[in-house]
Amino acid sequence: MTLPVSAQSLRVAIIGSGPSAFYAAEYLQKQSPTPVSIDMFERLPTPFGLVRGGVAPDHPKIKTVTKVYEKIATQPGFRFFGNVTLGQDIRHDELTARYHAIIYAVGAQTDRRMGIEGEDLSGSHPATTFVGWYNAHPDYRHLSFDLTQSAVAVVGNGNVAMDVARILASTPEELAQTDIADYALAALRASRVTDIYVLGRRGPAQSAFTNPELKELGELADAEVIVKPEDIDLDPLSAAYIVNDNDRTAERNYQTLLRYSHQPLQGKSKRIHMRFLVSPTRLLGHDCLEEMELVHNELVQAEDGSLRPRPTTITETLPVGLVFRSIGYMGVALEDVPFDARKGVIPNIDGRVTRDGAVVIGEYAVGWIKRGPSGIIGTNKPDSQSTCEQLLADAADGKLLTPVSERVDISALLEARGIEVVTFADWQHLDAAEQARGQAENRVRAKFSDVDEMLAVIRAARG
Ligand code: NAP
């Protein structure tokens, strides 16, 4: 491999510490023919991105993937720089001066908007903030959601919508032993929500949720799923799609919905109403949200063969006092890094960052900021690998950055600026403290949600 002359080893900065970041690190550790040193920067004191801040608290198995990430983080040459924000604590040019390559793994930190009147009424929220709130994410801990409302709408038919509906419909007992934020559990304990409307703009065959998540809704202790048979009547094209296209997810989802539609009412305290072919057109209320106007849709075939929703003349009004729009995440631009604002991603060709179509030397993207918010955690492994293959090919061709101040370690710069860096060992102390707190309450962990509190625990552990 022809690396820049002064290189003793391949020096890579990874921005972000979620799944795509760790899979990129793992691939480089295993596949780089030259020793690789990896500095992973994370704006929070805690690693693991959406595994900590996104995965629902009642899905603990999914979170065990962090064991794999811990192994990666304790390999020689790996350093974690928690509590360090790119664009605030360090600048882009300070990274390009110190590393052969930078990998952006910052995910998609905001949400898509519906673009309808009343969207910003009090009581209308992006689902992403509710998810961050119940997961004790420091950015969302101060939010409050009016759970005194009896009827809530969740707009969208993806797995985030399923998570939100399930958390709203769970009993406090079902959540009590999870790592849900203390304040969220207390708020949900006092919740008066009884009816949750999950609104899909297309039909059951086009749902984005997966079957285990749909089935889980039917397994809740004190909530039942309501599907009106006429709501899941398939149009001929959707019926043909399920039969001919061998889409097992669509078929299983349809069968599960069919089963729900035949179920007699069980008289449970909460109801999850799965509605299809409806789109919100307006949110109405005086000081706060009182109702939602919906239009009924029909499906029409688009040029690419997909079935798209088209509004009919039929409308209805749904009295809801709380709305979560769960219609997808959006990436956010990083200072001095190219950004495609329409798609919400860093423009790239197979993971190589581009500016105006031309490849930017030494800069790469992985995960949701590369491809948009799609797939499950495991999807990020091949995605990160494919970007890192390009990186290693560029290293072999000598087409990386040339660190000019290789001897000046980034740590010195951060120290001079008074940035309190959280190392991986620090995080492990915090992790142990959260687990110990949790154990005392018979929970898997009791998360800290306040950055200052996290730093205080870390300082105390350092002694
Ligand atoms: P998603 O899977 O992309 O679903 C977004 C949903 O919003 C779709 O049903 C989409 O409908 C709908 N939508 C988009 N724009 C809309 C609009 N203007 N009005 C009404 N509906 C609209 O996104 P997500 O739920 O945020 O999930 C993101 C990713 O994380 C997904 O890959 C998901 O599987 C994954 N995830 C996985 C889990 C898990 O494994 N348990 C949990 C959470 C998230 P159309 O199809 O009609 O566009």
Image (cartoon, rainbow, N blue to C red):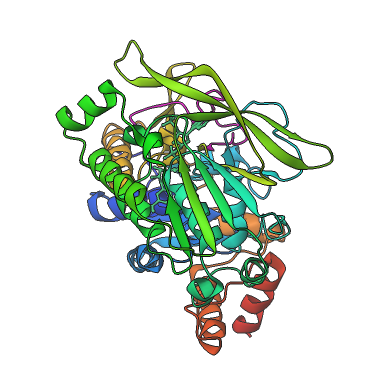
User: Going by the image, does 126 lie left or right of 142?
Assistant: left
From this view, report whether residue 196 is shown above or below residue 339: below
Between 124 and 75, which is closer to the camera in this rendering? 124
Quadrant of residue 205 within the rendered picture: top left
- Residue 400 % position (x, y): 39, 35
Magenta region, residue range:
329-351
> Looking at the picture, how far across and down is residue 274, in whole percent?
45, 44
The secondary structure making up most of the magenta span is loop
Q: Nearer the viewer, residue 186 or 25?
A: 186
Residue 53 visible here: no
Considering every residue shown, the one lying at the far bottom of the view is 440
Using residue 463 as the reference point, say whether residue 24 is left or right of it. left
Q: Residue at x 73, y 59 (%)?
A: 142
Q: Residue at x 68, y 60 (%)?
A: 141
Residue 402: quadrant of the picture: top left
Residue 95 visible? The answer is: yes
Outermost residue toward the front in this view: 264
Q: Is residue 64 magenta?
A: no
Q: Residue furthest top?
A: 303
Q: Position of residue 161 (x, y in %)?
A: 49, 47
Name the quarter where the N terminus is drawn: top left
Residue 306, percent across and down? 32, 20
Q: Quadrant of ligand 1?
A: top left
